[in-house]
Image (cartoon, rainbow, N blue to C red):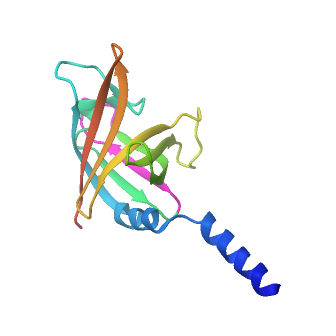
Amino acid sequence: MKQTLALLLCTFLLSCGASKTVKVSKKVIKGDWTLNEVTYSESGTYKVNLLNDAEKNCFEGSTWQFIPNNNTGIYAINKTDCAVGVRNFVFTIKEINEITGLYDFLLKPTDAKNKSQNNVGFRLNLTQLTETSMVWEQTLSVDDKPFTIRMIFSKTIN
């Protein structure tokens, strides 16, 4: 009886933890990244305010740091014609979405103490993650048609 109870307890604890795939993803994402390019699935001129913060041109060249042991990070907008400075966020990498086959990546802007001012977060698809590159996608609706924003990162080698 004790062995059965111990086995059930171990099974429960293991099932509650993050999967091996998510743990590996967190290890890969750890560190410093540069957001090199933001692209759209449709041609044209669009005024998109990414993460309710700044426009595409301000985000391109921004630097990002991910600290997966506490699911926090920062990004810095560096362009002088933008609202420069460091922003804080918390993030979560979820299991592969059964419908899309992609990872769900949740990002919530916070203050320096990791508290959200408005409890607004962003669900993105983590479509690529390697030791040197990462791609996020977010699909919205524009004129009742899918519109995908793609953010392309490269890992900063220290």
Q: In the rendered view, does 29 fall on the left or right side of 2?
A: left
| Residue 88, x across and y down, in percent | 46, 46
Left-right relation of 42 to 65: left
Relative vertical location of residue 74 with respect to residue 80 in this rendering, above or below? below
Residue 74 x %, y %:
41, 50
Residue farthest toward the top in the current orientation of the protein: 143
- Residue lying at 56% horizontally and 48% vertically, measured from the top left: 114
Q: Residue at x 68, y 69 (%)?
A: 12
Q: Quadrant of the N terminus?
A: bottom right
Left or right: where 17 falls relative to 91: right
x 43%, y 47%: residue: 105
Residue 70 locus on image (x, y percent):
53, 61
Q: Position of residue 31 (x, y in %)?
A: 35, 62
Residue 79 located within the stretch drawn in magenta: yes
Establish if 33 lies above or below 45.
below
**Magenta stretch: dominant secondary structure:** loop
Queried whether the magenta region covers residue 57, the answer comes back as: no
* The quadrant where residue 86 appears: top left
How many numbered marks have been drawn onto this rendered protein structure? 0
**Quadrant in which the C terminus is drawn:** bottom left
Q: Residue furthest left?
A: 43
Q: Is residue 10 left or right of residue 144?
A: right
Boundaries of the magenta span: 70-84
Q: Residue at x 28, y 20 (%)?
A: 47
Hey, which quadrant is residue 119 in on the image? top right
